[in-house]
Image (spheres, grey):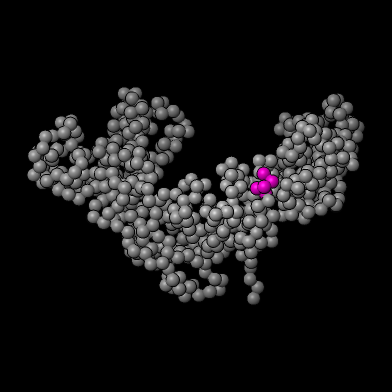
Amino acid sequence: MTTTPSRWEAQRSFDELGRPLRDVTFCVVDLETTGGSAEGGSMITEIGAVKVRGGEVLGEFQTLVNPHTAIPPFIAVLTGISDTMVATAPGIESALPAFLEFAAGSVLVAHNAPFDVGFLKHFAQRQGRPWPGFEVVDTAKLARRVITRDDAPNCKLSSLAQVFRASTTPNHRALSDARATVDVLHGLMERLGSLGVHTLEELQTFSARVSTAQRKKRHLAESLPHAPGVYLFRDERQRVLYIGTSRDLRARVRSYFTASETRSRMGEMVGLAATVTGIECATTLEAAVRELRLIAEHKPRYNRRSRNPSKMHFVKLTREPWPRLSLVKRVLDDDADYLGPFSSKKVAEKALQALHDTFPVRQCSGRLPRRARRSPCVLAEMGRCLSPCDGSADEDAYAAVVRQLRDTILARPDEVIETITARMSTLAEAERFEEAGVHRDRLAAFLRAAARTQRLSALSRCAEIVAARRADDGRWEVHVVRRGRLAAAGVLPPGGDAHAYVAQLRASAETVSAAPGPVPAASAEESELILRWLESPGIRLIDIDGEWTCPVAGATRHLAVHDAVEESRRTLVPFDERRELTTIHQPAR
């Protein structure tokens, strides 16, 4: 039986960063033109090209091109190409297809490539020809990264030809200049070879910012597989420096030792790295989840995110005779309602204030007895609190407000939206735009938190979700999610029994106990990764133990409208020029 190789197997024929230069066919091209801009009406008068591989010339291409317009005198003097010479030459309509056929399957090389390639693409477009999508190497760009002032005064082709002792002297004729560029290309590759540049991708992305010592550590990636997974950089004392994830472990790690990785922090990290450990994963989702868990465990100093997933804040609606809203750092199994998590206390306070602006529940701390007899606070005197502290509050009225508050957090945020939108509109009409902006930020913080709460709590209520999706390589990825935590991941073997495989995967999955309260049994970041995967196109739900539902009128739909309005406000008009944009436009019910 013939099997089609998977996408990963097909990629094993060449490393993502590893096509050896000796095996690459280059087509070095040069053009002569009537001016400097194809868009401005300049025409091509000559095309010259040399095809080389492994230092050997495979063929040459040269043709004059009739521009069907007079060649400017100074161009004729510079190139030696006159109107008489091109009078019987083919036009670009036939010269370009001939060149494209000659260059097919090769990597284009030119000195100042944007000029030459730009002209060729322009005329291909004008003829209605699809551009073949050549990879391009610019010798001028490379030279500026390699050649110093001690080598040459500049990076012109004539100067570089002298530096590398080209066998052909550039003379502003296409084929001669292309031949000289071949020698310059080989000279640059020889210099870069001593710096550890041996592949096409390393040549294309070479940067002098990547040190020789950094390049010499490429061997650390050689034992890693071409597979999705997580990689850990460690120093000489085996301390974890950095953790990342990739669809192709070997290719990604190798990129840290080439010019494609030029972040200064990463350069510093690679300088300290002594080993790289790879953890192969069945799917990219499993790799992303493992990355989060490992970062939380090791807290590598070169990872800036996900280091403290437990450092969260919640807004809590307490369960007591006179409930109140409180800012807390963890969820308890106390039957209370929670909004969050928030990664920032500042954002949590904004959401809390949005609720306090809408609902007149007490803001004092501590428990109140059912029959309290205290002096009323300032908020009570301002009418912003029902004042249960002095015994004047009606229990039923207070309970009704709390029920409405709870419904707002868990299901329908309409009350907060209407109250704050009205306040924003009033402030905007009074041209108090900064104050309106404060309320806008409070509303945004609340909506995002409510949407997050509703989506995460829905996932955490499900004891188990089994789902599958067909990956790019045609195989089916299967995941078992228990109470918001990834419990197992696998790929259905080709030709295997799907039912038996899923049953085996479920049997071997991690046992997950419910977390206290409405939060998932994993970090919020992990559960959100899982949610994005579950909500992605092509998902097939195999089995669900529980109800995975979100309120139809919940915060998510309002948040989408809010974000769209905010985006238009930022990109189209200033805040103070469109007062109506301070209003949250609600969808029709």
Instruction: Residue 264 in the image: state x and y as whole percent.
Output: 59, 41
Q: Main secondary structure of the magenta part?
A: helix
Image quadrant in which the N terminus is located: bottom right
Quarter-wise, where is residue 94 in the image? top right
- Can residue 190 be seen at all in this image of the molecule? yes
Residue toward you, 475 or 186: 186
Q: Which residue is drawn at the image coordinates 82% and 37% (left, top)?
A: 160
Specify whether 497 is left or right of 465. right
Specify whether 46 is left or right of 337. right
Q: Which residue is drawn at the image coordinates 36% and 53% (left, top)?
A: 455
Instruction: Residue 117 in the image: state x and y as whole percent.
Output: 74, 40
Image quadrant in which the C terminus is located: top left
Residue toward you, 554 or 509: 509
- Can residue 98 be seen at all in this image of the molecule? no
- In the orientation shown, which residue stands out farthest toward the right? 84
Q: Is residue 487 above or below residue 252?
A: below
The range drawn in magenta is 211-215
Q: Is residue 337 above or below residue 355?
A: below
Instruction: Residue 146 in the image: state x and y as whole percent.
Output: 74, 39
Q: Which residue is drawn at the image coordinates 86% and 42% (left, top)?
A: 179
Instruction: Residue 81 in the image: state x and y as whole percent.
Output: 88, 32
Residue toward you, 272 or 178: 272
